[in-house]
Amino acid sequence: MKIEDLKKRLDPNRPMTSVTIRIPEDVIEDLKRVAPLLGFSGYQPLIRAYIGQGLRADLERLEGDPVSVLIASLKRHGVSDDVINNALMDIVQK
């Protein structure tokens, strides 16, 4: 992923759009139960995180981006998402 693309992805004010998706009620209940345990403010941010993780994995596999490959390697070595995101924010803010 290019640095400019990374900056856009980490921008907290980036534009959002609404989507409608049908999800079984029991899955929503599970998401609501798990979200606060994982530090999310609600189930929707958790869903976005799950989608983002899957998307990054697919982009890495399809594009072979060096930053994505590095992030995946760090995760495999036990580096937390928080540490990785903080490091990425440090890079973007420079």
Image: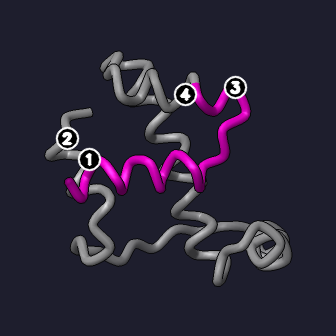
Q: What element carries label 1?
A: helix
Number of numbered discs visible in the structure rendering:
4
Q: Do the residues labelled 4 and 3 touch (CB within 8 Å)?
A: no
Q: Is mark 3 on a helix, strand or loop?
A: loop
For residue 11, which quarter of the picture? bottom left
Label 2 Cα neighbours within 10 Å, binned few <14 / some 14-19 / many ≥20: few
Q: Mark 3 points at which residue?
A: 77
Between 83 and 29, the one nearer to me in the picture: 83
Name the amino acid, label 2: Ile
Name the amino acid, label 3: His
Identify the residue shown where x is 45% and y is 41%. Answer: 55
Q: What distance separates the C-alpha of mark 1 from that of mark 2?
A: 5 Å
Q: What distance separates the C-alpha of mark 4 from that of mark 1?
A: 15 Å
Give the magenta-colored segment's residue range.
74-94
Label 4 Cα neighbours within 10 Å, binned few <14 / some 14-19 / many ≥20: some
Q: Is mark 2 on a helix, strand or loop?
A: helix
Mark positioned earlier in the residue sequence (4 or 3): 4
Q: What distance separates the C-alpha of mark 4 from that of mark 2?
A: 17 Å
Q: Mark 4 points at which residue?
A: 72
Q: What distance separates the C-alpha of mark 3 from that of mark 1?
A: 22 Å
Name the quadrant of the N terminus.
top left
* The magenta stretch spans residue 17: no
Q: Name the residue under label 2.
A: 3
Q: What distance separates the C-alpha of mark 2 from that of mark 3?
A: 23 Å
Identify the residue shown where x is 46% and y is 24%. Answer: 70
